[in-house]
Amino acid sequence: MEQVINRKKEKTQFVCQSCGYVAIKWLGRCTECGAWNSFVEESVVVQKSHRSAQTREKSQAVPLHNITSHEDERILFQSAELNRVLGNGLVRGSLVLIGGDPGIGKSTLLLQEAAAAGKPDFQVLYISGEESNQQTKLRATRLGLDSQHLLLLAETNLEVILHAIEESKPQLVIVDSVQTIYQPEMESAPGSISQVRECALRFLELAKSKNVPVILVGHVTKEGYLAGPKVLEHMVDTLLQFEGDRQQFFRILRAAKNRFGSTREIGIFEMHETGMIDVSNPSEIFLSQRSSEASGSAVVCAIEGTRPILVEVQALVTSTNYGTPQRTATGFDSKRLALLLAVLEKRIGLRLGMYDVFLNVAGGVRLDEPAVDLGIVVAIASSMKNATVPQDMIFIGEVGLTGEVRFVPQLEQRINEAAKLGFKKAVVPNLGGKKITTPKNFELIETIRLDDLFDQIF
């Protein structure tokens, strides 16, 4: 009888691993996100919340006009690309989450920036839940890093970590990674939804109450999403994601969320034996290996935040060996590719129904801007006709469903960037009498429709 009573006192809940929805019983399909077999059982410990036991000063409402904010409150890292993505530096008291595939360079970048940021009046605490202090030291030695003002702590217990932060009083805290930290008062395993949510909340309270910025490293699932509850992304101030292939040297750091800056900025790095190195002129590097005699190649200009980037797009059109032709795009939306192929077939007369079309954006960059449409259709037509495109020509414009070339913003900025890299001509939409300042000896080729453009080029 006593065992039965004790079982009744035990409380469990079922949490969806996809969206964090909590149910009182196991469900085969989540009613919130629709995922199947995503519920896991977790024990609930009935205890007094630590927040109610804490004594805090009473908060008072303050008029917006009376609140002062200064730009010098941002912390500048050694990496200019990291500062660019963060919005010209790290805001004090902010919570930042960095995610990416294993081995892409998250820990490498943070360790080298932590070592460079450490100064006599600015201590950095690097908390490693996956490596010991000796292992972190070996990694720092391999990268050529050493600092007397970088503190290392190999710990996964949240209470011990918070106590160490209270004693050392650092100006920057880096946690690698949040999925390895656990709250000992909770019975669930580290990395579970409840543990990640609770630990992230405690770090959020630390950042806001102590005005100390905290950077969290997050694991990702095999689908590329951040592991843990979706609320983790809502809690942080800034969400950064590393993109790129581990087999390539280039890494792209993109801001998926930023409360203190633009989400259009990207940072480009190059992986070396000595760590992550900034790429200050990505256009020049992306075009350095461009072939001058191959067909199916064109250069486009995309705007990422405030910076224009010139990228080579490559297309390969070949006869299909199967009943259904393949449509494969790397670095570009496959649905947008299908739309452009339909425009070429309907408006221009290119019969692509019996051909496989492969599209690749060189350098591992992903293009989402409509301004690159014109260069993509030119590259496809170039491969189809086996004709080369002039090497000193760049293509800027959006392609409409009727085959017209539409105007895009920031045209002057794109043209100036192309002129810096040696391009002499730019195919642009019809300006309609609008005057645009162009560099010396730079030619603008205005076009209204694709068929007129193809007659001039091919």
Image (tube, rainbow, N blue to C red):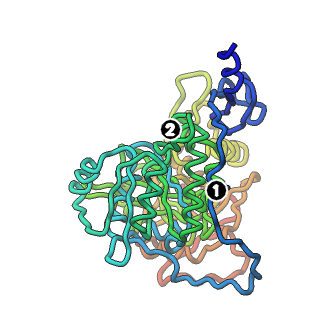
The residue positioned 44% from the left and 67% from the top of the image is 172
Q: Residues within 10 Å of mark 2 (few under 14, many from 20)?
A: many
In three-dimensional space, the C-alpha distance between marks 2 and 1, rounded to whole angstroms, equals: 24 Å
| SS label for mark 1 | helix
Q: Position of residue 429 (x, y in %)?
A: 66, 67
Answer whether residue 412 is visible to the viewer in this image. yes
Query: Looking at the rendered structure, which numbered label has been put on residue 53?
Result: 1
2 or 1: tag closer to the N-terminus: 1
Question: Which residue is identified by label 2?
Answer: 190
Q: Amino acid at mark 2?
A: Pro
Image quadrant in which you'd find residue 39: top right
Answer whether residue 387 is visible to the viewer in this image. no
Q: Position of residue 217 (x, y in %)?
A: 47, 51
The residue positioned 26% from the left and 52% from the top of the image is 139
Q: From the viewer's perspective, is residue 39 above or below residue 206?
A: above
Position of residue 229 in the picture relative to residue 283 (left or right): right
| SS label for mark 2 | loop
Position of residue 347 in the picture relative to residue 277 (left or right): right
